[in-house]
Image (spheres, rainbow, N blue to C red):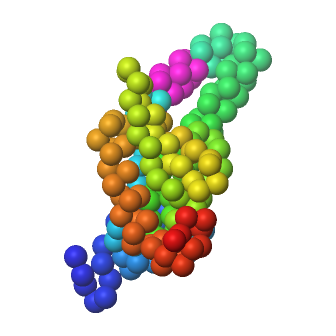
Amino acid sequence: MQTDGYASPPLDSCPVCNYSLRGLPARHRCPECGFEYDEHTRVWRPRNYWKFAGFTFVCCAMGFLQAWDAFSDGNRTKGLICASILAAVIAMTIYAYRRRPFLAVGPGGVFVKTGFSVVDHLRWETILDVSVHKGGERRFTFIRTVDGRKTEVGAVLRDMAEAYELRELVAAGLKRYAAPERETGAGGRGG
């Protein structure tokens, strides 16, 4: 939806640093961290974080009740320990939410973050393809690079449909963003 040269960005916030991208052009860089995005950018995040949030809420409620009970009984030491643990759980939950895993496909390549790891940036000229395999109940989705490295990204994707969508978007991205480099022989795969 175009208005005054500005289009709605494909995302509300930067997947790398959570900076708000509202009001910015559809093709831009995050002002905070430099993450490049455009109208073709796609971001996946695991859907099971609500289960994590529910579990954390239950733990916090139990911690609050334990601390309240200890303070009511006059046991300040136990109450302070419970309150400290509760504060730590809340802080870790906020940190985990802000640093949650993601997978992003954009003009700069593919960005992958699983768990509390750092963001892995796979540039278009280094990407070979996406390999999707299903073995029994498990599925394996790897991004293969020209140097033989495999980056497992299946934990971020919800199902096989998302894995196949990733494969198609990476193939389109290789044509759109990396084609000139590959035709001239850069990246180790050109002709």
Q: Name the image quarter holding the N terminus.
A: bottom left
Q: Nearer the viewer, residue 178 or 74?
A: 178
| x then y, percent, for residue 188 | 61, 65
Main SS of the magenta part reads helix
Is 59 a magenta residue? yes
Please identify the residue farthest to the right as the structure is shown. 77
| x then y, percent, for residue 107 | 46, 70
Residue 80 drawn above or below residue 100: above
Q: Nearer the viewer, residue 132 or 14?
A: 132
In the image, what residue occupies the spot 31% across and 88% down? Answer: 5
For residue 118, say whether it is visible: yes
Quarter of the image for residue 136 reads top left
In the image, what residue occupies the spot 57% across and 45% down? Answer: 151
Please identify the residue farthest to the top as the structure is shown. 73
Q: Nearer the viewer, residue 154 or 55?
A: 154
Position of 54 with respect to 117 (left or right) is: left
Position of 151 with respect to 163 (left or right) is: right
For residue 29, say whether it is visible: no
Give the residues drawn in magenta, as a range.
53-65
Residue 185 drawn above or below residue 73: below
Please identify the residue farthest to the bottom as the structure is shown. 4
